[in-house]
Each structure stands twice: as C-alpha cells, then as structure tokens.
Image (tube, helix red, strand yellow):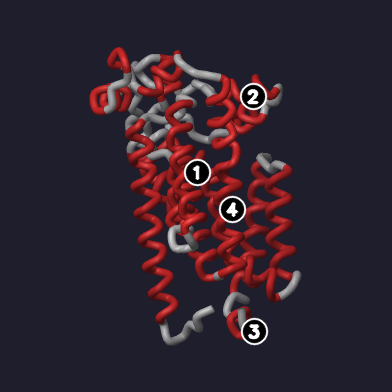
Amino acid sequence: MTSRSLDNVRGPALWAPLLAGAHLAAVTASGHVRPEHVAVDVLVFVLAVAGRRSRAFLAAAMPLWMTGVLYADLQPLLLPYRGEIHTGALWALDAALFPAPGGKTWPGWFAENHHPFLDLVCGGAYLLYLFQFFGVVIYLFVRRPELGRAMAWSFLGVNLLGISIYLLFPAAPPWYVIAYGPGPANLAALPSAAGAARFDALLGIGYFAGFYARNANVFGAMPSLHVAYPTIAALFLWDRGATLRTLGIAFAALVAFSAIYLVHHYVLDVVAGCLVGATTFVLVRQMARGIARSPQQELT
C-alpha cells in the first residue's frame, strides 16, 4: 500500500472517534453500558491515533463496529415497530416444500434425532462463524486492502438487509414453535440456544447459553444471517485459489446444515440467507468497483 493510498483513509481517523465517543456516552447515559462497549469504543480511539497503518485498518473495522451498534443497540429500539409476528407459517411451508421423514420439518426431525458427533461438529461451526468471517476480512485486508474493506462493508450491508426483513416479516425460529406452538406470539419468550445447548453440555461450558441470552430479537429467523456471513466469505474467497475457494464453500455448507440441525433455522431461512448474502456481495463489489474507477480515487 502506497503512502498516498494510506492518506486516502485518514477520514475515519476524524469521524470514527466521534462516533465511538457518542456511542459510549449514549449507552452509559441509558444505563446499558457493558464491558464490550467500553473495549470496542476504546479500540476505535486507539486505531485512530496509533498511526497511518492502523488508520488504514480502521477503514475496514468501522463497518464491523457499526454493525455491532446496529444489531445490539439499535435493533431493540426498532422492535416495537415491526410487523405481525409469524409463528407457524414457516413451519408449515417448510414441511410442505422440504418434508423430512414423517412429514415433519427437518429442524423438527433433528430435534428428535441427533448424535453427539454432529453436536460437536455443528456446535463448533456455530461457535466459529463470526471468527471465520473476521479472519477472512483481515486476510483480505493484508493481501488486498480494497477487498478487505469491501467485505467489511458487506457485513454492515447484509445486517441492514437482514434486520429490515426481520422488522417487515418477523418470524419465529423452529425451536420456538417446538416450545410454544404456532399460536399467537409469546413476546415474553426467552431466547434459546436450542440444539447448541448440547454442545455446551458435552464440553461442560456455557458459551451458547450466554451467547443467546443476549439475543436482541427472538423473532428474527428469516433470513439466516448465520448462513449469510459464510456465504459472503466464500464469495470473497472465490478467486483466491482452489484451496481457499473449497474451504470457503465447505464452511458455508457446514454452517447451513448446522443452522437446521441445531433447530435454529428452517431450510427456507437457509436459502434466504444464501440469497441475501450473495445479493449483498454483488451490490458491494459493484459499488467498490465504481469508487475505484472514480478519477478522484487511486487503486490500492
């Protein structure tokens, strides 16, 4: 990366600390500040002042930070304005389109038919899905910074799209229907680790119990963002060689299966997750290429 291209990312060093400071002040004033809020907001300040290379990485890190604020802090404020909550509609449609043995949905079938080996493998995939995404962002940023930044913005874009759908078409996950039935939505229902709780039990840990206890939206099953993230990663790795392409596809497929096996998503949710991930990838790549072709920009 040239000195001039590093200078092109000085912008985040100016506005990123202001955003982080405003966010930290807001969550503190609301009484909802958590240790991770402080840690991440302080990290933004450090990246902004540590040097040109850290500022360059900040250009890729800020969309990830913005996604965290959107998902954990802003989404709960929007839930009172969501549409009618659907509890049994996806269960019935999934059973009709993708019937499991006995005419059940596949998540319903796996809720009764599971194996410790698959519990470990699928739980491991669900544990690693965010680490895989962020790892690919960092890898691409080191190799081709413009691709790393584009992938980071894809993360924000797919979450904006997914949360918008959650608000327009809020839908219960399969574990909810198993626990509460397809009747009127129980707004007091607590989030659940569902089949991932078996992973916790096998290893004697409470990772998924704690992870899902902080879920901001129980009725955000369609589309599966768990699947959208590795789909985007696989697409960004597509032209990085046969090995990385194969690994990206394999991990995306494993997460897709895990989403169903662990009773978190229907087959329909998984298909929708692939579609929103691919759509976001195409849109962001097109936007990034348009910016790169702009006479005011220098290719890195």
Q: Earlier in the sequence, mark 2 or mark 4?
A: 4
Callout 4: helix, strand or loop? helix
Nearer to the camera, 177 or 235: 235
Q: Are marks 2 and 4 in contact (CB under 8 Å)?
A: no
Residue 16 vertical placement versus 227 (above, below): below
Q: Quadrant of the C terminus?
A: bottom right
Pointer 1 residue: 251
Between the C-alphas of marks 1 and 2, the distance is 21 Å
1 vs 2, front mark: 1
Circle 4 packing at 10 Å, graded few (<14), some (14-19), many (20+), is some
Which amino acid lies under the numbered mark 3 shown in the image of this protein? Ser
Q: Earlier in the sequence, mark 3 or mark 4?
A: 3
* Residue at image location 34% in from the left, 21% down from the top: 105
* Residue at image location 73% in from the left, 43% down from the top: 35
* Residue at image location 33% in from the left, 27% down from the top: 86
Callout 1: helix, strand or loop? helix
Callout 2: helix, strand or loop? helix
Pointer 4 residue: 134
Residue 94 vertical placement versus 294 (above, below): above
Pointer 2 residue: 200
Between the C-alphas of marks 2 and 3, the distance is 48 Å
Between the C-alphas of marks 1 and 3, the distance is 36 Å
Residue 262 as seen in the image, left or right of residue 26: left
Which amino acid lies under the numbered mark 4 shown in the image of this protein? Phe
